[in-house]
Structure formats: C-alpha cells, structure tokens
Amino acid sequence: DAGITQSPRHKVTETGTPVTLRCHQTENHRYMYWYRQDPGHGLRLIHYSYGVKDTDKGEVSDGYSVSRSKTEDFLLTLESATSSQTSVYFCAIMGSSNEQYFGPGTRLTVT
Amino acid sequence: DAKTTQPPSMDCAEGRAANLPCNHSTISGNEYVYWYRQIHSQGPQYIIHGLKNNETNEMASLIITEDRKSSTLILPHATLRDTAVYYCIVRASSGGYNKLIFGAGTRLAVHP
C-alpha cells in the first residue's frame, strides 16, 4: 500500500469553516497528489507536489491550498469550506515507474 | 495521453479467468498501458503496466497486441474480492506532472 495514510478518514464540517486534510507517507516519495472523486466526474487532480515546498495547481484548485514542509506530509486546506467541496479526497504518491499509489481516502461532508 | 475504450460492465464466475479488454488505437510509441482498479469506497489500486511486451505480476497478466492498439488484463482465477471497477489508462512514462485521467472503466462483477 506504499505506506500512505490519510487523516481524518471522515469529517463533517459547516460551511465557511477551514478544514485541513493530511496525507502521510513513509517511503520518501518525491511526488504527491491530491484528488477529489465525485459521482459523474471520476478523479480530478486538485494540487500536486514535486518536492518539499514545491507545489503546483491541478485542474480543480480553486478554494484549496496545499503545503509540504516535510517529504512525508502533504496537507490540503479548504480555506472556507463550501457544500460543493463535499467529496471523497484521495492522496497519492508516484512510484518508480510512474504508477500511482493511493491512500484510503477522506470522506468530507460540508453542511 | 491516448484515449481508451472499455466495455462498461462484465461478469465472471468465481474461479474462472476474467479477461478485461481495452482499446487504445491512438497510442503513441512512448506511451505505456496502465491498469488500476477501484473497489467500492476504497482508493484506486495500481495493478500492472506495460509498453509492448506481455507482463505478469502477482495480481494479473497484461497482454498487449503487437500493434499496441489494444490490450487485455487477465485475472487468472477471479475471486469475489476482485469485484471492482477496472480502469485502463495510457500515458507516457516520464517524470513530472502525472495527472491520471480515469475514464468510466469496466465494472467487473464476480459471482459465485
């Protein structure tokens, strides 16, 4: 499973509150990714990181920010949660052959 | 990345081989074929990938046609736990920005 954990696994929050999701990996992978998955849309890339303090936007980055101060941790922050950000969030790392390994996901509900 | 076409659903009896096809007629020379699956409510799982030679690992075999325009993922002895959505993705295997584009995939149902 490439040693990927996500926390929390489930969260319910109110509109307008900030939320931070954590992705932790234990195998020193350089590339890390945040995706969201919604019915009818499949997986969509939010942000990715190619090293400590090196991040870039994906296709659905509005309303999200990320930080990577250590190789092992990649944080996703919803600055002011909205109902449209209710989703399942997956973190992933890239392996040695460009394959990606995914975490177990975080189910976020914004009420 | 080249577009892929997969059947929307397939059935397989437990213990039999599941053969999942994928068409990728516009694949270019430097693009690999990757297979992932997603079991309900879990994160996607990498299965196998290949360029032009057939590949086998502990999970599955990948057969790529000589012209590379199609491939087949083979689960040799399907179990109920193999029920999932299977995704075929074609992309260049080079470093950098590696967004995965998941299509609709094939929903495989393994039945007793």
Image (cartoon, coloured by chain):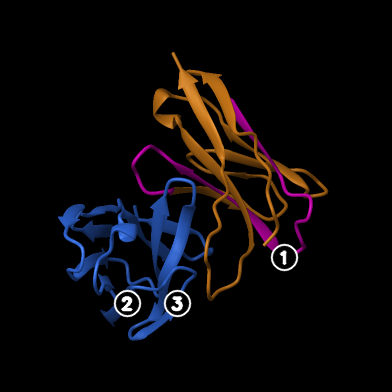
Chain colours: A blue, B orange
Q: Which residue bears the numbered disc 2?
A: A65
Question: Residue B30 has which mark?
Answer: 1
Q: Residues within 10 Å of mark 1 (few under 14, many from 20)?
A: few
- Asked if B45 appears above or below A79 in the picture, the reply is above
Res B12 seen here: yes
**Residue A11 vs residue A52, the one in the foreground:** A11
Task: Using the numbered discs, state the Cα–Cα distance from disc 3 to disc 2 in whole angstroms.
Answer: 9 Å
The residue positioned farthest toward the top in the image shown: B112
**Amino acid type of the residue that numbered disc 3 sits on in the rendered structure:** Lys
What range is drawn magenta here?
Answer: B16-44
Residue B96 in the magenta stretch? The answer is no
SS of the residue under disc 1: loop
User: Could you tell me which residue is drawn at 81 percent across and 46 percent down?
Assistant: B66
> Where residue A7 sits: x, y (%)?
20, 59
> Where residue A46 sits: x, y (%)?
41, 68
**Amino acid type of the residue that numbered disc 1 sits on in the rendered structure:** Asn
> Where residue B81 sits: x, y (%)?
39, 29
SS of the residue under disc 3: strand
Q: Tell me which numbered mark, 3 or 2, is placed earlier along the sequence.
A: 3
